[in-house]
Image (cartoon, helix red, strand yellow):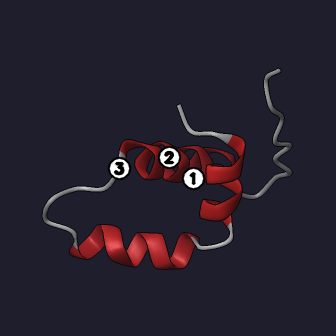
Amino acid sequence: MTTRSELEWLKGRVHVVREVARHSTDGLDTWMMDGLAFLDEHGGHAVVLVSRK
């Protein structure tokens, strides 16, 4: 599961992460791939990040 802070970090650096993903032969951490999939699915509209207590 991707944490809130990881998703916020990823959202601000999507262009960098996509470039790394294109050139990575060993694969990326699951949280990066999950986060990219989430941002792709929800692109173009507001995303509210919440945390569990």
Query: Against 40, is 3 above or below?
Result: above
Locate residue 33, reporting x and y percent.
41, 49
Between circles 3 and 1, the one closer to the viewer is 3
* The residue positioned farthest toward the left in the image shown: 25
Locate residue 50, reporting x and y percent.
83, 35
Q: Is residue 8 left or right of residue 21?
A: right
Identify the residue under disc 3: 29
Q: Secondary structure at mark 1?
A: helix
Between circles 2 and 3, the one closer to the viewer is 3
Q: CA distance from mark 3 to mark 1?
A: 17 Å
| Amino acid type, mark 1 | Asp
Locate residue 10, reporting x and y percent.
60, 62
Q: Disc 3 or 1, which lies upstream in sequence?
A: 3
Q: Is residue 24 left or right of residue 16?
A: left
The local crowd at label 2, few if under 14, some if 14 to 19, many if 20 or more residues have their Cα within 10 Å, is few
Q: Secondary structure at mark 3?
A: loop
The residue shown at (71%, 43%) is 4
- Report the number of discs: 3
* The residue positioned farthest toward the front in the image shown: 53
The residue shown at (34%, 74%) is 20
Identify the residue under disc 2: 37
Question: Are the residues tagged 1 and 2 within 8 Å (C-beta)?
Answer: yes
The residue shown at (50%, 46%) is 37
Locate residue 23, reporting x and y percent.
23, 76
Q: CA distance from mark 1 to mark 2?
A: 5 Å
Identify the residue under disc 1: 40
| Amino acid type, mark 2 | Ala
Tell me which corner region of the image, top left, top right, bottom left or bottom right, holds residue 44. bottom right
The local crowd at label 1, few if under 14, some if 14 to 19, many if 20 or more residues have their Cα within 10 Å, is few
Tell me which corner region of the image, top left, top right, bottom left or bottom right, holds residue 21. bottom left
